[in-house]
Image (tube, coloured by chain):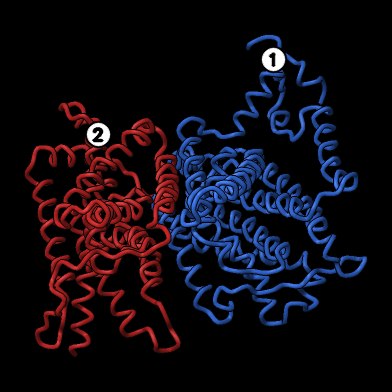
Chain colours: A red, B blue
Amino acid sequence: MSYFFQLVVSGIVVGSIYALAALGFVLIYKSSKVLNIAHGQIIAAGAFIAYALTGWVGIPIYISFLLSMVITFFLAMSVERIFLRRLIGEPIISVIMVTIGLMSIIDGLIFLTPFGSVNFSFPQFLPQELISFGGVSISWTQLVGVIVTVLMIGGFSWFFKKSTVGISMRAVSDDQFASMSVGISVPRVFGLAWATAGLSAAAAGGIIGNITGLNFETLQAFGITVFPVVILGGLDSILGAVVAGIIMGVIQQFASGYLDGNWGLNGTAEVLPYIILLIILLFKPHGLFGIHEIERV
Amino acid sequence: MSTNRWLATGNYFTSYQDEQRLFFTHLDRTILTMFLLLLFVWPLLFTLSNKYMLVIDNILIAVVAIIGLNIVTGFAGLISIGHAAFVGIGAYTVASFSRTLGDSHVIITHAWPLMIVLSGLTGAVFGAIVGLPAMRLKHLYLAIATLSFQMIFTWTINFLEFFNQGQTISISRVFWFTGKLGRKDHYLFWYYVLLVVVVLSGFMVRNLLRTRYGRCLSAVRDNDRAADAMGMHPGLTKVYAFGLAGFFAGVAGALHAYVYRGVGFESFTLHHSITYLAMAIVGGLGTLNGSFWGPAAIITLELQVETLAEHAGQILPSTWNLATALKPFSFGLVIVLFLMFEPRGIANWWRIVRSYTKLWPFRY
């Protein structure tokens, strides 16, 4: 039984990171209806910037995490400004293909740095010993990661519910023309959506980098696993992203805990989310919390 | 069929049938025939080293795959981020025969045209299955469905013992009427096969676009509600667009397996899917001649990048992994730049050149 709870706990840890990664993705989709396929690369970039700041420049690690979030904020904003601003009004399909191109470009840029070939890891700054109660143990890194994630998601929810900028972002996602007529600058909101997505991606990257080490493949894979998460949660729901992230994390842990090693299976955690994704697309395409008025053909 | 279209001042179509012709004038037909003849004859006139023959074979394989991708992404307007997986399905159809019957069984070495068609059909079945969500959903979701198919495909190939866990599965040289192909003639022989396949599929697609089903595709792309109102079934149209794309991809995969005499999973990864998309975009989405320009341009670019990385690698320290970095970077840059500045691709340059020469010396 404690094995079961252990899997649930580590599932929640992984899932909350999925939730944070999915949050940025949902933000961009909600405001501009663009699927950002380069999200995993932004996550990786955030983590690498944080490492470069602390490992090479020598800034204290807490400050370098914050700085990496700020840098990624402006980086994502400029990506929107340079590449996507001039595509407003173009068919959405070409905007998505631009993000595919961006994914390739950032891949190339990361391969230019040592991060593409060498695995680094953040310096240990939290206590090493495990916290355990009732047979379930969790490391400090994971615990802090979950707490930061919960705080971030709480902060973002408050931002969207209460702040003027957040409300204008929700307005744009609801109806662009109506929000223009009440004086909201739609391009600015798009830029801001990308920027906040970059910020949350950097936070997710920092947390993943602390838990698993800085491997480009792993970090980038998070960006692709975000797809099953957001589809399960409903593409345009932040609550859905959180719930689905945790569900997906727990499912993956169960898969690697119970399925692997039995019946000759191996590595099921990598493939199960995509199978679930295809099934959801066939039977419940708006996900758990998505708006039901999906445009059908 | 009458006057020289290059000298005419207008279209002068008198019926819709006129407009739908494959060749407007005898001159058009003659030029195309001469061009095709040239493609068949040039290897007899001077010989090319195997290295460059392989490059040309690669381009032609990619052309077959891109013709498929253009049906689904260009004509039907659905992004497919899993095209390499469909190509892989075709290649692994051949590979599974090789695994069960041995790599030089008669079916593989003698009945290879059958194998190619069979791979195409398998690809079509998988394409239609992945396209099934299209019955209910629009393109955003379909892009994700194809992406997840790519992930599932890669995992399955790497997992199953039957597929040698992604390691190379060998396929032996084929037989022609003159006996088993020699090492020297291998790439030349497949050049001719590929040329025939490319010409056939080019005509297939050109003809498809003249039929009800082809027009269905672009109608659904342009406005699915209007298409629905005019009695087409948008969902089914998309499913069969995926099926057709899968067919061409499967054929390309089988040809890939035969040309390389082996199948390994590393030729069918997500990166290859993105490369295929880059080819389709650079060539020009929704145009048939774009399917020829795109692969040629991208594969040439790839070669140039490789030579550049080799030269730079001699100067720079070896820790700089330039080759792996420059390839995705240049592909990404090409995709983005083309989408931003020339969304209609190289096919559009071809169109401009044609209309310029046609109207010369006048501007318009």
Query: The residue under label 2 is which amino acid type?
Result: Gln
Q: Where is residue B304 in the image (x, y as percent from the top left)?
A: 62, 44
Residue A176 image label: 2
Q: Residue furthest left?
A: A162
> In front: B315, or B185?
B315
Rendered residue at 82%/41% (across/down) = B36
Residue B310 image label: none
Above or below, B270 relative to A273: above
> In front: B354, or B262?
B262
Q: Which residue lies furthest to the top in this view?
A: B362
> In front: B229, or B85?
B85
Rendered residue at 72%/64% (across/down) = B116
Which of labels 2 and 1 is toward the front?
A: 1
Residue on which disc 1 sits: B359
Side of A297 relative to A194 (left or right): right
Q: Where is residue B191 in the image (x, y as percent from the top left)?
A: 78, 53
Q: Where is residue A244 in the image (x, y as percent from the top left)?
A: 24, 64
Query: The residue under label 1 is which amino acid type?
Result: Leu
Rendered residue at 18%/52% (across/down) = A59
Q: Where is residue B189 in the image (x, y as percent from the top left)?
A: 82, 58
**Residue A271 placement: quadrant:** bottom left
Quadrant assignment for the N terminus of chain B: top right
**Residue B74 placement: quadrant:** top right
Above or below, B134 relative to A124: above
> In front: A119, or A189?
A119
* Circles 2 and 1: CB atoms closer than 8 Å: no
